[in-house]
Amino acid sequence: MFTVVPTSKELLHKVAACHMACFPGSLSTKLGASYVRKSLEWFLVDENRFLFQIEQDGVVAGYCGGFIPRKIGDGSSSGMLQHAFSEAIKGIIKKPWLVLHNEVVQYYPFIWRNIKRKMTGKVQPAPTNGPQKEFKPFVGLVVIGVHPQHRGSGVAQHLMAEFERQVKAYKQTELYLSVKKDNGRAIKAYQNFGWKIDEDKKDTYLMKKVLL
């Protein structure tokens, strides 16, 4: 029997272990367990974020985290990296070849801003591109994973149902997620749960679902 458990700091190590089993080749896993735990902790430090896990007999079978931005430019990826920045640097020091990883390269400007901020104590605003659009509230599905040993057992359905339940608790209706174009399995799964491709980006699709 599966049980929904709100993630606490005391349980982060269990969720981190599940994440690393789900995504053994990801940059976050390569940076180490300390980085994964710290980046997931980001979901627990503000009321506009949430993280939960699905357990069976005390073992994490899957996890999911969401985020409700408050303004344009309020991003989850940069937020998680900034929260776990020190652990990321430690991970790169241990494995310096990761500095050339494509996921790290795309964050070079962000990393440089953080280094300058730590050295000078001054916060530099992130650059903006073009005119700002009107902000509309939504909920982003930021992280989700099903442990390899529990795939095909209905965990994904439990995760998505609980995610939507929590979204409704925030009185929101528009849901978004980003998925890599080459992840056909995930795209099909999301479509089966009622998500539709909303925007075609360079390497990813932005998918959307509206709750009635």
Image: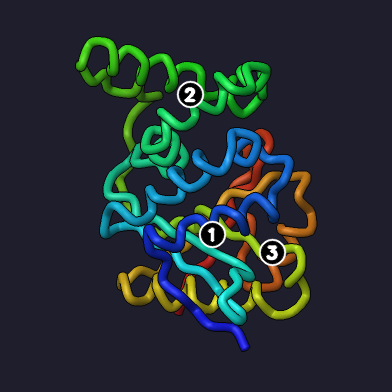
Q: Percent from the top left, x then y, of residue 1?
A: 62, 89
* Residue 173 numbered mark, or none: none
Q: Is residue 98 above or below residue 55?
A: above
- The front one of 109 and 98 is 98
Q: Earlier in the sequence, mark 1 or mark 3?
A: 1
How many numbered marks appear? Answer: 3
- The front one of 104 and 6 is 6
Q: Percent from the top left, x then y, of residue 175?
A: 47, 62
Q: Secondary structure at mark 1?
A: helix
**Please, what is the three-letter code of the amino acid marked with disc 2?**
Ile
- The front one of 17 and 156 is 17
- Residue 59 occupies which quadrant of the picture? bottom right
- Residue named by callout 1: 15
Q: Percent from the top left, x then y, of residue 71?
A: 28, 44
User: Seen in the image, is 6 located left or right of residue 149?
Assistant: left
- What residue is at 55 percent from the left and 65 percent from the top? 63
- Residue named by callout 3: 147
**Please, what is the three-letter code of the amino acid marked with disc 1?**
Val
Give the quadrant of the C terminus.
Answer: bottom left
Give the CA separation, mark 3 to mark 2. 27 Å
Determine contact: label 3, label 2, CB under 8 Å: no
Give the CA separation, mark 1 to mark 3. 10 Å
Q: Secondary structure at mark 2?
A: helix
**Please, what is the three-letter code of the amino acid marked with disc 3?**
His
Mark 2 nearby-residue class (10 Å; few <14, some 14–19, many ≥20) = some
Q: Earlier in the sequence, mark 3 or mark 2?
A: 2
Q: Is residue 28 above or below residue 144?
A: above
- Residue named by callout 2: 89
Give the CA separation, mark 2 to mark 1. 22 Å
Q: Percent from the top left, x then y, of residue 128?
A: 35, 24
- What residue is at 48 percent from the left and 71 percent from the top? 163
